[in-house]
Image (tube, rainbow, N blue to C red):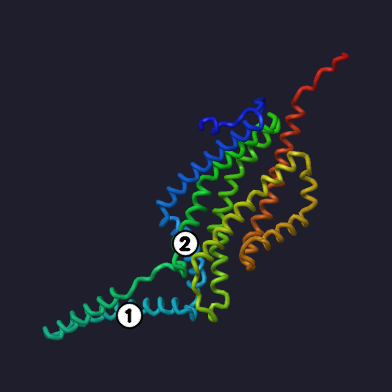
């Protein structure tokens, strides 16, 4: 198994059976690492679910902090309970003041008892809790948890999986091609994680705030766990894949398929492609589409700048190399 952790050299010659055996070993290593990550994530499933539910609470609070509660029964109930707790605590404070200024012992005892009752009432009011998805099926708590844990395990084991893919295809590259392929493949996990983080903190809360508060007066809004987690994970994965734009652009420019000047002259078409991609990605609401469109186009522009820098460095290295000697001289 240790041999699967290192790439095969370009000079090595393997038969078809050797390639299949190598592929089998790498797949086994990937499965083992994924299962270990799955076990760790299953052990911490409550933490993972809390992380996944946080955009739901943050997104819902973006608009609720600025507006009065809607006609949603859950929101109205929470607002009523908060008002009851506030009123009970204020009443207890008032009764304490009356008890302190009362003349007779009987009146003082009565006010003290009323203050204690108001404090007990405030304590009995259920505390305000974060919004959580609801489950409808008998097995939905189990299936939803396993699905989220599997996605988290895949994200956790992604660097190792990508390294195994790189190590398997490495013999197909020459040493010169490897100098181009290795930095690009190393960029993949970092860009993927950056896309996931961007979607988690920027895209999901805004999208949830818009979708959950759109025409909310006409609906009793309950969020099913299966649909919410499917939407969230799809957005996270789609954004992680979309952040691979620099890898694709650098690959085609380094391969000589297209030049940076051609990319600069095709900005209008690139913006149109980014807009279509944002429209096809999950979440067809305007907020989600704009949240996806902006980073896609910024990544395109940043990729052009990075490709131009790499082209200048390549030309500088070629100019610094000594010209080969003429054999006829």
- Residue 7, horizontal then vertical, whole percent: 59, 31
Report the residue marked by disc 1: 87
Tell me the quarter of the image containing the C terminus.
top right
Dividing the picture into quarters, in which one does residue 259 lie? top right
Q: Secondary structure at mark 1?
A: helix
- Residue 130, horizontal then vertical, whole percent: 42, 67
In the image as oriented, which residue stretches furthest toward the front? 17
How dense is the environment of label 2, judged by Cα within 10 Å: few (below 14), some, or many (20 and up)? some
In the rendered structure, the answer to whether residue 67 lies left or right of residue 113 reads right
The structure residue drawn at horizontal position 18% and vertical position 82%, both measured from the top left corner, is 101
In the image as oriented, which residue stretches furthest toward the left? 105
Is residue 57 positioned above or below 250 on the image? below
How dense is the environment of label 1, judged by Cα within 10 Å: few (below 14), some, or many (20 and up)? some
Disc 1 to disc 2, how far (Cα)? 30 Å
Q: Secondary structure at mark 2?
A: helix
The structure residue drawn at horizontal position 43% and vertical position 52%, both measured from the top left corner, is 42
Viewer-closest of 73 and 290 = 73
Report the residue marked by disc 2: 54
- Residue 13, horizontal then vertical, whole percent: 66, 26
Viewer-closest of 220 and 295 = 220
Viewer-closest of 124 and 324 = 124
Q: Which mark is residue 292?
A: none
- Residue 246, horizontal then vertical, whole percent: 67, 47
Is residue 327 positioned above or below 50 on the image? above
Dividing the picture into quarters, in which one does residue 204 lie? bottom right
Count of numbered marks? 2
């Amino acid at each position: 198994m240790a041999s699967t952790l290192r790439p095969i050299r370009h000079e090595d010659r393997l038969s078809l059976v050797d390639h299949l055996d190598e592929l089998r070993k790498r797949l086994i290593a990937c499965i083992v690492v994924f299962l270990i990550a799955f076990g760790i994530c299953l052990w911490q499933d409550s933490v993972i679910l809390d992380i996944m539910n946080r955009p739901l609470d943050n997104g819902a609070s973006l608009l609720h902090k600025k507006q009065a509660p809607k006609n949603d029964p859950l929101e109205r109930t929470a607002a009523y309970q908060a008002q009851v707790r506030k009123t009970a605590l204020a009443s207890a404070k008032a009764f304490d003041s009356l008890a302190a200024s009362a003349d007779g012992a009987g009146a003082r005892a009565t006010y003290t008892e009323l203050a204690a009752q108001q404090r007990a009432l405030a304590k009995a009011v259920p505390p305000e809790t974060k919004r959580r998805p609801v489950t409808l099926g008998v097995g939905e708590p189990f299936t939803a948890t396993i699905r989220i844990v599997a996605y988290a395990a895949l994200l956790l084991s992604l660097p190792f999986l990508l390294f195994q893919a790189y190590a398997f295809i490495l013999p197909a590259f020459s040493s010169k091609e490897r100098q181009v392929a290795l930095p690009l493949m190393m960029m993949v996990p970092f860009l993927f994680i950056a896309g996931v983080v961007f979607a988690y903190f920027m895209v999901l809360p805004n999208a949830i705030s818009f979708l959950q508060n759109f025409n909310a007066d006409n609906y009793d809004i309950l969020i099913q766990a299966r649909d919410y987690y499917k939407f969230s994970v799809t957005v996270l994965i789609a954004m992680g894949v979309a952040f691979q734009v620099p890898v694709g652009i650098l690959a085609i420019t380094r391969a000589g398929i297209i030049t940076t000047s051609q990319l600069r002259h095709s900005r209008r078409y690139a913006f149109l492609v980014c807009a279509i991609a944002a429209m096809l990605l999950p979440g067809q609401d305007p907020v989600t589409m704009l949240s996806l469109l902006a980073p896609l186009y910024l990544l395109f522009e940043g990729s052009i700048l990075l490709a131009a820098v790499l082209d200048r460095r390549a030309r500088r290295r070629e100019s610094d190399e000594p010209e080969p000697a003429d054999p006829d001289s």
